[in-house]
């Protein structure tokens, strides 16, 4: 019988089944009875709960075996008895008893709890990681905005101060040259050199300022800037400057500051070479946007040059600049058939 209620479980020694109890039903007593009914008060008993008792317990004439607080597990209850003459039945009988563990001590619950614990750790880690990534992204955005602000301010300051003063240097030098009409040729030559250098420095400064401006970060801006440089350079030279392929579709291609600077310097150098050495009548600047590929070219219909002329300093500088922006540059020319410079770069 169970100690926590009035239920009784009646089984005889011939019963070979199992008894199962829950973890809360570990208080019970087993009533023992020998099959010798001649003088039952003379019968004696001995029992043992394998897995709990170390030795046999001789209860004498007491025919109850009581157990309390048995741990969950598998047990075998063995019992033997005597007849009224005191002769032991050594074979006895046995009964398997199972006490089921509470759900929180079962293997499946432990596995589930471990899974939940590990899942919680992973979830917390992911939440923290995402929070850190968002924080890093915000910090990067703030840094980027601050860098753009500094670049824009620097571009404005350079444009307002340095560019203006360089222009004034050139103008003052022109005035001095005109007033020194009786100066020696050597002095006039130095003045011409100052004028040329100040103009060159003014143009270079303008390009540098334009590169700094974060609002001019698209391929469209680069193409328009080179178009304006070409039109200014070839103005009143008798050379027609033609542009093709410049459209608002180029606005979607954003270029880093270094890429914009090197592309500008490559094609301005190309324009200088054409103006000084080609003897052409037409120059074509073309931009084409293909799948994952950008092509910018500058071609002329001048006298061209031989392979031996491709090792000049200007062309070497253009090659080096193309390598710095991970682009390829190609020079095509034959004597009497003009020349072509083409830069190819990936857009993705």
Image (tube, rainbow, N blue to C red):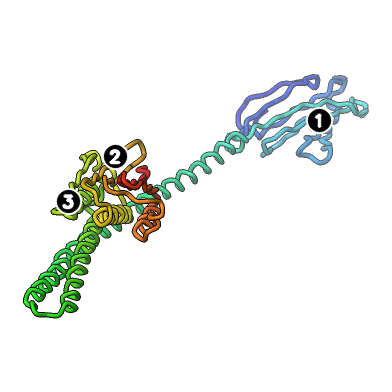
Left or right of residue 48: residue 4:
left
Q: Gap between marks 3 and 2, in whole Å?
A: 20 Å
Circle 2 residues within 10 Å: few <14, some 14–19, many ≥20:
some
Residue 131 seen from this side: no
Q: Secondary structure at mark 3?
A: helix
Q: Gap between marks 2 and 1, in whole Å?
A: 96 Å
Q: Which residue is mark 2?
A: 288
Q: Residue at x 22, y 40 (%)?
A: 244
Which quarter of the image is occupied by the N terminus?
Answer: top right
Q: Residue at x 13, y 54 (%)?
A: 236
Image coords of residue 146 (percent x, y): 26, 59
Q: Which residue is mark 1?
A: 78
- Mark with earlier residue (2, 1): 1
228 or 270, nearer to the observer? 270
Left or right of residue 308: residue 113:
right
Residue 159 vertical placement versus 62 (above, below): below
Residue 296 falls in which quadrant of the image?
Answer: top left
Left or right of residue 312: residue 227:
left
**Hey, which residue is sitting farthest front in the picture?**
336
Residue 91 falls in which quadrant of the image?
Answer: top right
Q: Gap between marks 3 and 1, in whole Å?
A: 111 Å
Q: Which residue is mark 3?
A: 231
Image coords of residue 47 (percent x, y): 81, 33
Q: Secondary structure at mark 1?
A: strand
Q: Are marks 2 and 1 in contact (CB under 8 Å)?
A: no
Residue 315 seen from this side: yes
């Amino acid at each position: 019988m169970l100690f926590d209620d009035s239920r009784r479980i009646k089984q005889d020694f011939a019963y070979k089944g199992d008894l199962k109890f829950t973890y809360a039903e570990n208080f019970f007593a087993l009533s023992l009875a020998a099959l010798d009914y001649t003088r039952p008060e003379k019968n004696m008993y001995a029992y043992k709960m394998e897995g709990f008792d170390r030795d046999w317990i001789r209860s004498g004439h007491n025919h109850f075996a009581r157990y309390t607080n048995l741990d969950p597990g598998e047990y075998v209850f063995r019992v033997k008895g005597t007849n009224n003459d005191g002769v032991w039945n050594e074979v006895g009988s046995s009964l398997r008893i199972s006490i089921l563990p509470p759900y929180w001590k079962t293997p499946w619950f432990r596995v589930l709890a471990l899974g939940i614990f590990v899942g919680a750790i992973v979830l917390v880690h992911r939440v923290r990681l995402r929070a850190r990534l968002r924080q890093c992204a915000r910090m990067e955005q703030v840094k980027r905005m601050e860098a753009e602000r500094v670049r824009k301010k620097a571009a404005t300051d350079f444009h307002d101060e340095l560019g203006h003063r360089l222009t004034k240097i050139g103008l003052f030098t022109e005035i001095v040259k005109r007033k020194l009409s009786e100066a020696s040729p050597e002095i006039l030559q130095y003045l011409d050199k100052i004028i040329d250098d100040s103009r060159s420095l003014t143009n270079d400064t303008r390009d540098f300022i334009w590169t700094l401006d974060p609002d001019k970060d698209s391929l469209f801006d680069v193409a328009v800037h080179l178009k304006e440089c070409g039109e200014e350079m070839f103005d009143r030279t008798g050379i027609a400057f033609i542009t093709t392929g410049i459209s608002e579709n180029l606005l979607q291609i954003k270029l880093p500051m270094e890429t914009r600077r090197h592309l500008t310097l490559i094609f301005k150098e190309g324009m200088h070479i054409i103006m000084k050495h080609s003897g052409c009548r037409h120059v074509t600047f073309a931009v084409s946007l293909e799948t994952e590929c950008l092509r910018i070219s500058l071609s002329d219909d001048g006298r061209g040059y031989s392979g031996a002329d491709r090792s000049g300093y200007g062309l070497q500088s253009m090659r080096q600049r193309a390598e710095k922006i991970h682009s390829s540059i190609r020079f095509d020319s034959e004597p009497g058939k003009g020349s072509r410079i083409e830069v190819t770069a990936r857009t993705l």
